[in-house]
């Protein structure tokens, strides 16, 4: 049952990571697996492989977590990304209304974990909000799809994907790589996927150690910053819904559904952990 629940978390994280504006890290946090995941990643030391210390490297791996979680994420990315491409192209207002509900509910979940409000936490939240709002400009950078930049995009995107509150898929969209990587997944372009994957692996191994340290020593400030990020990133779905000009009762209902879904997931997984 534990393996199945971890696999289900992976599916949900993969779905979220395929969506510009929604963070797989948020799903991990909501479903109660975030701290275990970050700590497990931070214990991976490539230096052990270089030194030939395979036994210790293997011992540090939380395979009971990585295998089912990774399988769920991979399956969701390969299957859900194609659906996302269709929905974002053909049903943008409905899709982004649902995203709006998901994103809006996530800060409420994190808010319960930051403790008593003080000026320092408010300051970090404001910094996060301003940063996300500025980053969420509708202007998308047009970048050539060179292999070095794809490597860099992979490293940047994976760092965002493991953070509750900021979307790696959105950063790929901002960098002009989202549709290119989605196409590479559908067409099994192994060269592009290998370079992107190597960048992601480099980024996650480097960033997870810093994040693990920050979450252990400055958890409330990190979460305050991430709450600000989420609220600031609401600019994305709002702009897309307004741009599409299809505001109706179905759009509102999907926004409410997305909002409620977050709390349903939190309630369900709270019983399992």
Image: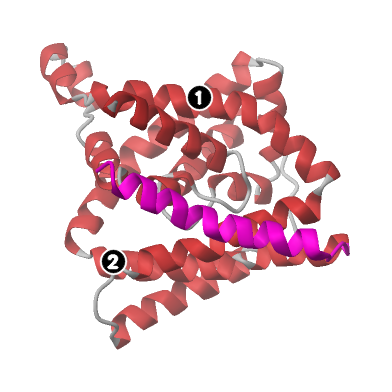
Q: Residue at left 20%, top 53%?
A: 213
Mark 2, other Cα within 10 Å: few <14 / some 14–19 / many ≥20: few
Q: Is residue 6 above or below residue 185?
A: below
Give left or right: position of 51 versus 121. Answer: left
Q: Which residues are magenta?
A: 245-273
Secondary structure of residue under mark 1: helix
Residue on which disc 2 sits: 113
| Residue 152, position as x, y percentages in the image | 53, 38
Give left or right: position of 94 versus 165. Answer: right
Residues 174 and 119: in front is: 119
| Residue 81, position as x, y percentages in the image | 65, 32
Q: How many marks?
A: 2
- Farthest residue toward the bottom? 119
Q: Earlier in the sequence, mark 1 or mark 2?
A: 1
Is the magenta region chiefly helix, strand or loop?
helix
Q: Residue at left 43%, top 31%?
A: 8
**Res 261 visible:** yes
Say which quarter of the image contains residue 76. top right
Residue on which disc 1 sits: 74
Q: Residue at left 32%, top 40%?
A: 206
Give left or right: position of 16 versus 264. Answer: right
């Amino acid at each position: 049952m534990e393996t199945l629940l971890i696999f289900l978390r992976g599916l949900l994280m993969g779905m979220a990571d395929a969506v510009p504006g929604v963070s797989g890290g948020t799903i991990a946090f909501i479903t109660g697996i975030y701290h275990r995941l970050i700590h497990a990643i931070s214990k991976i030391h490539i230096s052990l492989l270089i030194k030939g210390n395979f036994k210790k490297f293997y011992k540090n791996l939380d395979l009971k977590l990585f295998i089912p979680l990774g399988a769920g994420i991979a399956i969701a990315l390969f299957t859900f990304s194609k659906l996302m491409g269709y929905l974002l192209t053909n049903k943008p207002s409905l899709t982004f209304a649902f995203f709006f509900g998901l994103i809006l509910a996530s800060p409420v979940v994190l808010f319960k974990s930051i403790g008593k409000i003080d000026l320092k936490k408010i300051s970090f939240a404001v910094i996060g909000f301003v940063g996300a709002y500025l980053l969420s400009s509708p202007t998308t950078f047009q970048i050539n799809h060179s292999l070095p930049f794809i490597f860099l995009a992979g490293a940047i995107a994976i760092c965002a994907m493991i953070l509750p509150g900021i979307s790696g898929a959105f950063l790929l969209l901002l960098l002009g790589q989202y549709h290119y990587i989605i196409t590479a997944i559908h067409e099994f372009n192994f060269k592009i996927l290998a370079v992107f994957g190597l960048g992601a692996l480099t980024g996650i191994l480097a960033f997870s150690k810093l994040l693990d340290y920050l979450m252990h020593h400055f958890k409330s400030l990190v979460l305050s910053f991430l709450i600000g990020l989420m609220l600031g990133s609401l600019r994305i779905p709002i702009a897309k819904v307004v741009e599409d000009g299809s505001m109706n009762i179905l759009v509102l209902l999907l926004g409410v559904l997305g909002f409620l879904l977050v709390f349903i997931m939190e309630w369900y997984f709270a019983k399992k952990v």
